[in-house]
Amino acid sequence: MNITIPEEILPLTPQMQHILAALALGSMNGYEVIQQAREDAGGIMRLGPSTVYPALKKLRGMELVKLDEHYQPSGRGRSECAYELTPTGRHVLQAEIKRQTELAELVRARLAAK
């Protein structure tokens, strides 16, 4: 699949990176996204409902995330919908990883040269 990424999408915010990275594991409800993103961030940023739900809404508008039509609510009183990466979202996440890796390699080389 050849997907063109509009220039204005990258770079993703750190919060969006962590949300997409969480969803790379598979479909999750909002609470699960928050828990996984917090774990992945290792406590270096705050990722609560007031950050994650607006970001999920924006990511849906960007067509990087969609609602999982096959999600079966657990009935535990948590979020009644689940989210999943779209093919475009997966491609954008891969492009973001590539962009960050290239930057890290550039910085590493410059620091080694001094």
Image (tube, rainbow, N blue to C red):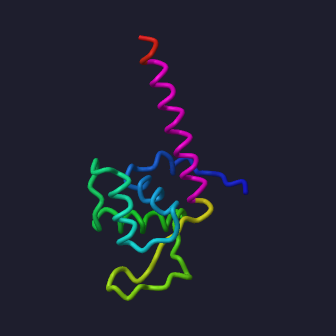
Q: Which residues are magenta?
A: 89-110
Q: Nearer the viewer, residue 93 or 54?
A: 93
Image spot of residue 24 (x, y percent): 52, 60
Location of residue 22 by image quarter: bottom left
Residue at image point 51% right, 62% down: 25
Residue found at the very far right of the displayed protein = 1
Q: Say which quarter of the image contains residue 35.
A: bottom left
The residue at 34%/56% (across/down) is: 39
Quadrant including the N terminus: bottom right
Farthest residue, direction top: 114
Q: Main secondary structure of the magenta part?
A: helix
70 relative position to 20: left or right: right
Image: 6 above or below 33: above
Q: Is residue 102 magenta?
A: yes
Picture coordinates of residue 11 (x, y %)? 47, 45
Q: Is residue 107 above or below residue 28?
A: above
The count of marks equals 0
At horizontal 34% and vertical 81% (from top left) the residue drawn is 78
Residue placed farthest to the bottom in the image? 75
Q: Report the quarter where the C terminus lies.
A: top left
Q: Is residue 8 magenta?
A: no
Residue at point 37% right, 80% down? 79
Q: Left or right: where does residue 29 sit relative to residue 92?
A: left
Q: Position of residue 65 (x, y in %)?
A: 51, 66
Of 9 and 13, which appears nearest the observer? 13
In the displayed structure, would residue 19 be above or below residue 28? Answer: above
